[in-house]
Image (tube, rainbow, N blue to C red):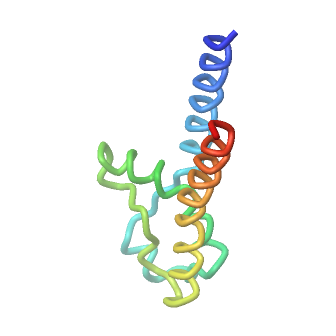
Amino acid sequence: MKQKNILFITVAIAVMVISVSSCAHNQVVDTCLTGEKYGFWAGLWHGIIAPVDFVVSLFNDKITMYAQNNNGTWYAFGFLLGSGGWGLLGGAGAKRRRRRRD
């Protein structure tokens, strides 16, 4: 039974990674600097998909983690909240496991 759970979790994570990686969007920096500026919501989304963007950027120079054409503080705040959510979710799971062991 335990192996079935591990297999299910592994497949679920693989499906999520593939789904989220399809959202990674790239733009040429020159056109990005003259287009619409990204704000808080775009920063939040870019922060959420940052782990996927990081892995993809290792293999593709056209992918970046952080939008070059942003409005400054609000974009950075959204990016910080979006990328910080990954650590918060992991910490909550660790607390649940510790309580069950005690």
Q: 10 or 100, which is in the foreground? A: 100
Residue furthest front in the image: 102
Height in image: 80 above or below 8?
below
Height in image: 42 above or below 20?
below
Residue 27, image x, y percentages: 45, 63
- How many numbered marks are there? 0
Q: 53 or 26, which is in the foreground? A: 53
Q: 3 or 72, which is in the foreground? A: 3
- Left or right of residue 95, residue 33 in this image: left
Q: Residue at x 60, y 44 (%)?
A: 98
Q: Residue at x 67, y 74 (%)?
A: 41
Height in image: 90 above or below 39?
above
Residue 72, image x, y percentages: 49, 89
Q: 83 or 28, which is in the foreground? A: 83
Height in image: 15 above or below 2?
below
- Left or right of residue 58, residue 42 in this image: right
| Rendering quarter of residue 45 | bottom right
Please state, as top left, top right, bottom left or bottom right, where the C terminus lies in the image. Answer: top right
- Left or right of residue 60, residue 96 in this image: right
Q: Residue at x 54, y 66 (%)?
A: 84
Residue 31, image x, y percentages: 43, 73
Residue 32, image x, y percentages: 45, 74
Please state, as top left, top right, bottom left or bottom right, where the N terminus lies in the image. Answer: top right
| Rendering quarter of residue 65 | bottom left
